[in-house]
Image (cartoon, rainbow, N blue to C red):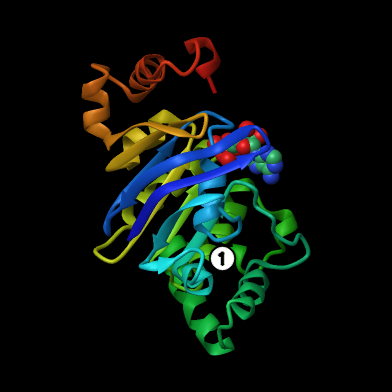
Amino acid sequence: MIEVSNLSKAFGKVKAADKLNFSVQAGEIFGLLGPNGAGKTTTLRILATLLKADAGSATVNGFDINKESEQVRTSIGVVNGGMGLYDRLSGSEVLYYFGKLYGMKRQAIEKRILELDELLKLGDTLTRRCGSFSSGMKQKIVIARALLHDPSIIFFDEATSGLDVMARRAVLDFVKNYPSEDRAVIYSTHVMGEVEELCDRAAIIYQGKIIAQDSTRALLGKAQASNLEQAFFTIVESSGLVPAVEASA
Ligand SMILES: Nc1ncnc2c1ncn2[C@@H]1O[C@H](COP(=O)(O)OP(=O)(O)O)[C@@H](O)[C@H]1O
Ligand SMILES: [Mg+2]
């Protein structure tokens, strides 16, 4: 569902994405694992057509990110940790607002909200003002907003940051159950345990480069590690990019 070929982006001297190659199949949760500043958000922003790559190419849901950005955008939903809700609007007002932006008709939005309520247990987040929400309630509306137009692909970018234990668990369980034969997820995080739990395959990204990419199990095996955190450090060290001390996120 996603094919990325030699994708590159620099900000001045910083190579935020350096000749990235990966693909994501339908039914898959693909992890993008790396410390802060590794280039995860940059990569996702390029794939979401919010940022232009300097070089390379990619297709998302079969659409070219440069030539068919409109179709790419309708194929994806983006969930990040930033929230960005309007405090004075209720959850359902937020969803109507964004539904209109997506060009959806009122009835379609209404119907979709009922489905999302069932899926995400939105409860009174629909009627209460966002300003009064807990972080977990906010994140539910952010996820609902990303799913409003029923995208085939969702990007989760550090989507559990700032959430309490319960809310984090709800997000992880939701992600786990989301993929189906015509859906896929890219799950970007610096939290190894989340990749270990959720992802079928993952790319380890460091200083804009993919330094390893494989099934989560194979990544563990390759580094002869019992958990992904151990594997991560072994792989970063053996990549020869920098001393291991700097690798901690
Ligand atoms: N708009 C920008 N302008 C300048 N530098 C940026 C910008 N966005 C990201 N960077 C830099 O690119 C690198 C990768 O950042 P980012 O993609 O946000 O990493 P991550 O999401 O993995 O934490 C970092 O060094 C960051 O400072
Ligand atoms: Mg980021």
Indicate the quadrant containing the N terminus: top left, top right, bottom left or bottom right.
bottom left
Residue 2, percent across and down? 36, 57
Q: Residue at x 44, y 66 (%)?
A: 64
Residue 196, percent across and down? 33, 33
Front residue of this view, candidates 13 and 24: 13
Front residue of this view, candidates 92 and 187: 187
Left or right, 108 with respect to 215, comes to: right
Q: Residue at x 59, y 64 (%)?
A: 124
**What residue would you read off at disc 1?**
145
* Residue situated furthest right in the rendering: 88
Residue 47, percent across and down? 49, 56
Residue at disc 1, secondary structure = helix
Residue 247, percent across and down? 51, 18
Whether residue 158 is visible here, answered yes or no, is no
* Residue situated furthest front in the rendering: 55
Front residue of this view, candidates 50 and 6: 6
Left or right, 77 with respect to 24, comes to: right
Q: Residue at x 58, y 87 (%)?
A: 106
Front residue of this view, candidates 128 and 159: 159
